[in-house]
Amino acid sequence: MRIDFIGVGFGRSGSKWLANCLYEHPEISIPKFNLHTEINYFPEEYETMGLKNYIKKFRNCDFEKRVGELSTLIIWNKKSAKLLKKLFPNVKIIIYKRKEEERAKSAYNVAKYYDLVDDNSLSINEIKEINQEEYVKPFIKEFGKNGVFIFDMDNRDKQAELNKLFKFLGVSSFTPKSIDERLNTSYSNKTGKKEPVKSKY
């Protein structure tokens, strides 16, 4: 069984929105549950469950189309790129990025919402940002620049960005119904209440 593409990260960067856009494309097939949650199988689950359990997740996909999935945690483990190259040498890698300051703040707000951050331990202005390029490089090294597509979530012309991605995947240009929808939520404590508020994507 082949897998044509895998999205590897980053989290809080529009992965749910992008999953819906890909799901709606008539030439692409992703697991339906990927619209609500990510697989995030590599490398940890693979090391304990093996490849067969991963492949089962695609059993309802249409393999006459381009088949793949979107995750957000794969990119954080630097072993992932080499492992994916070994398992799926021809797979295409998708990385979704937004400005690190905004991504980090969004992740912080989610952690606050679920009481994973001590209210007094960290302020919004003290969030530790990461160097995204450090996590992108291993995938460029293993798959080459032509094997990795970096989706710029900061590009306001989402149709143009999607068309570039569709070309990368070898499918036709397409305008998904979800292109202007805001499908995910961010979280804010500005009022002292923990209420989800609509995010950009």
Image (cartoon, rainbow, N blue to C red):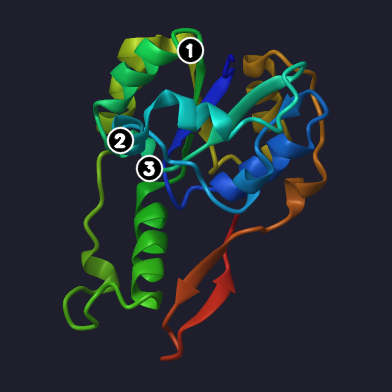
How far apart, in angstroms, are the residues tagged by discs 1 and 2? 27 Å
Q: Position of residue 96 (x, y in %)?
A: 49, 37
* Depicted 101 relative to depicted 60: above or below: below
Q: Which residue is mark 2?
A: 48
Q: Which residue is mark 3?
A: 73
Q: Position of residue 41 (x, y in %)?
A: 41, 37
Direction from residue 181 to residue 118 in the image, left or right = left
Give amino acid for label 2: Thr
Q: Tell me the residue at 58%/14% (across/down).
A: 2
Q: Earlier in the sequence, mark 1 or mark 2?
A: 2
Give amino acid for label 1: Gly
* Depicted 195 relative to depicted 198: above or below: below
Query: Observer-nearest residue: 197 or 52?
Result: 52
Query: Observer-nearest residue: 139 or 97?
Result: 139
Whether residue 157 is visible to the viewer of this picture, yes or no, is no
Disc number placed over residue 147 in the picture, else none: 1
Q: Nearer the viewer, mark 1 or mark 3?
A: 3
Q: Earlier in the sequence, mark 1 or mark 3?
A: 3
Q: Quadrant of residue 126?
A: bottom left
* Secondary structure under the numbered disc 2 in the rendered image: helix
Q: Nearer the viewer, mark 1 or mark 2?
A: 2
How far apart, in angstroms, are the residues tagged by discs 2 and 3? 17 Å
How far apart, in angstroms, are the residues tagged by discs 1 and 3? 19 Å
Q: Earlier in the sequence, mark 2 or mark 3?
A: 2
**Picture quarter with the C terminus:** bottom right
Query: Observer-nearest residue: 65 or 99?
Result: 65
Give amino acid for label 3: Leu
Q: Position of residue 10 (x, y in %)?
A: 41, 42
